[in-house]
């Protein structure tokens, strides 16, 4: 069954502007709403407006550039005509900031659904349904009900009238708190601050190594919270990480070892922060990102440059051999993959290798670092091979490269 979406964007906030244009995650609330329903497969996405100010038009243009089409309409009959007969329609209230989980759960339901919140002081801004519940701002209706509502609408509010007719027709009622969390009904920008913090807390990327599990989380949280309110694109952070890594390799080749390590250290959280920003903005990073692909070989080049410089300044060819061997075993371990294997948190990764260098750099023992890195990489490779053989006896799927 086809799925569309109908979103309200005509009510004003406390300052006289549109609720739909309240700032959220560096964009606007309407962009967040549209991305939520688009992520659930809704198309077309119809936005009911009375007027389209330039800021709202800009928001629609940004969505269009990201491949998400939005149809603004001011006439209810035009809205009805945009949906196929027999289709389901996600109804999203004006100024409502829902969780993507709630939207997905409602979108997957085959019958009409109305998400609710309790009728209490905390939720007094939400529209009352009865003496015990209020509308949470999210519902699933059908195009037939939308059409019949439009026929009798007159001067009544479309969303309120459509909601009540859907309830009268026997729609299911879900407690929003049990299906992804209660939405926020925003009337002021400061109300979205707490919601943004929840988005940050709910966005941790997979922490697949000890560096990202135990060292980097405070940095990631702070940076993600600060950057989500800006227009910084996640892809820029990936390219920044690559530029810093290449810069570190160049610095090592010139003998600027401290500067090189500093640049590599700054690069370690950037790809994770980028992934979290992309998740918050409901625009996942491409799995085929060139910058992401080049991060690993750029880090390998930095190791080789460090070994080459040490060989030319006080050490013999053995230190370069250690660097080459470390890079080779690291690549072999990467190809082995770690997904689902016990202890994979401790095997070699780009971030682990960079943070491991810090204590050696403090004491100026770079040759010892390259030897330690070689041992670490070789141990990781042989451990992964051993772990895969054992895991294959339990679950053959774990033998697939992660």
Image (cartoon, rainbow, N blue to C red):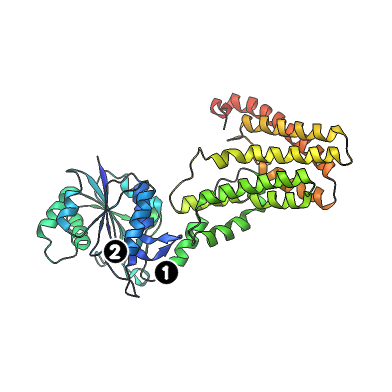
Residue depicted at 30% across the width and 45% down the height: 109
Q: Quadrant of residue 19?
A: bottom left
Is there any visible trace of residue 117 in the rendered image? no
Image location of residue 227, percent across then percent down: 53, 59
Q: Quadrant of the C terminus?
A: top right
Q: Is 163 drawn above or below residue 345 in the view shown? A: below
Of residues 320 and 35, the one drawn nearer to the viewer in this rendering: 320
The alpha-carbon separation of the residues under discs 2 and 1 comes to: 22 Å
Of residues 374 and 305, the one drawn nearer to the viewer in this rendering: 305
Is there any visible trace of residue 96 in the rendered image? yes
Residue depicted at 67% across the width and 27% down the height: 385
Among the two numbered marks 2 and 1 on one chain, the one whose residue lies closer to the N terminus: 2
Image side of residue 282 versus residue 248, left or right: left
Q: Is 118 drawn above or below residue 33 in the view shown? A: below
Identify the residue at the far front of this view: 254
Residue depicted at 67% across the width and 32% down the height: 331
User: In front of the other: label 2 or label 1?
Assistant: 1
Q: Quadrant of the N terminus?
A: top left
Identify the residue at the far bottom of this view: 15
Image location of residue 274, percent across then percent down: 54, 50
Of residues 197 and 388, the one drawn nearer to the viewer in this rendering: 197
Image location of residue 332, percent across then percent down: 67, 29
Residue 182 disc label: none
Image side of residue 115 versus residue 358, left or right: left
Q: Is 98 drawn above or below residue 2 in the view shown? A: below
From the image, tell me which residue sits under label 2.
133
Number of marks: 2
From the image, tell me which residue sits under label 1.
191
């Amino acid at each position: 069954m086809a799925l569309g979406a109908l979103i309200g964007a005509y009510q004003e906030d406390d300052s006289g502007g549109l609720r739909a244009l309240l700032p959220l995650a560096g964009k606007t609330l309407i962009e967040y709403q549209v991305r939520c329903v688009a992520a659930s497969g809704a198309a077309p996405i119809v936005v009911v407006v009375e007027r389209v100010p330039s800021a709202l038009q800009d928001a629609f243009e940004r969505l269009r550039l990201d491949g998400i089409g939005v149809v603004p309409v001011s006439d209810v009959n035009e809205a009805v005509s945009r949906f196929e007969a027999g289709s389901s329609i996600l109804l999203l209230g004006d100024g409502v900031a829902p969780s993507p989980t709630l939207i997905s759960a409602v979108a997957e339901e085959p019958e009409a659904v109305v998400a609710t919140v309790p009728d209490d002081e905390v939720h007094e801004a939400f529209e009352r349904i009865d003496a015990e519940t209020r509308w949470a701002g999210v519902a699933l209706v059908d195009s037939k009900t939308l059409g019949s509502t439009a026929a009798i609408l007159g001067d009544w509010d479309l969303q309120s009238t459509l909601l009540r007719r859907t309830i009268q027709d026997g729609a299911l009622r879900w407690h929003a708190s049990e299906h992804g969390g209660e939405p926020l009904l925003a009337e002021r920008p400061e109300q979205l601050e707490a919601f943004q913090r929840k988005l940050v807390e709910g966005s941790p990327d997979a922490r697949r190594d000890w560096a990202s599990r135990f060292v980097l989380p405070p940095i990631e949280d702070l940076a993600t919270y600060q950057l989500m309110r800006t227009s910084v694109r996640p892809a820029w952070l990936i390219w920044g990480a690559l530029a810093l890594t290449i810069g570190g390799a160049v610095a090592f080749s010139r003998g600027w070892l401290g500067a090189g390590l500093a640049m590599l250290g700054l690069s370690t959280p950037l790809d994770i922060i980028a992934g979290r920003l992309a998740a918050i903005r409901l625009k996942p990073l491409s799995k085929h990102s060139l910058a992401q692909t080049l991060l690993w070989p750029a880090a390998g080049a930095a190791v080789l440059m460090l070994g080459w410089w040490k060989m030319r300044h006080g050490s013999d060819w053995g230190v370069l051999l250690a660097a080459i061997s470390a890079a080779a075993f690291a690549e072999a371990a990467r190809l082995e993959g770690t997904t689902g294997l016990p202890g994979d948190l401790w095997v070699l990764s780009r971030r682990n290798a960079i943070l491991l260098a810090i204590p050696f750099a403090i004491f100026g023992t770079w040759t010892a670092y390259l030897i330690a890195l070689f041992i670490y990489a070789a141990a990781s490779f042989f451990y992964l091979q051993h772990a895969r053989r054992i895991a294959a006896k339990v679950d053959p799927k774990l033998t697939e490269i992660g």
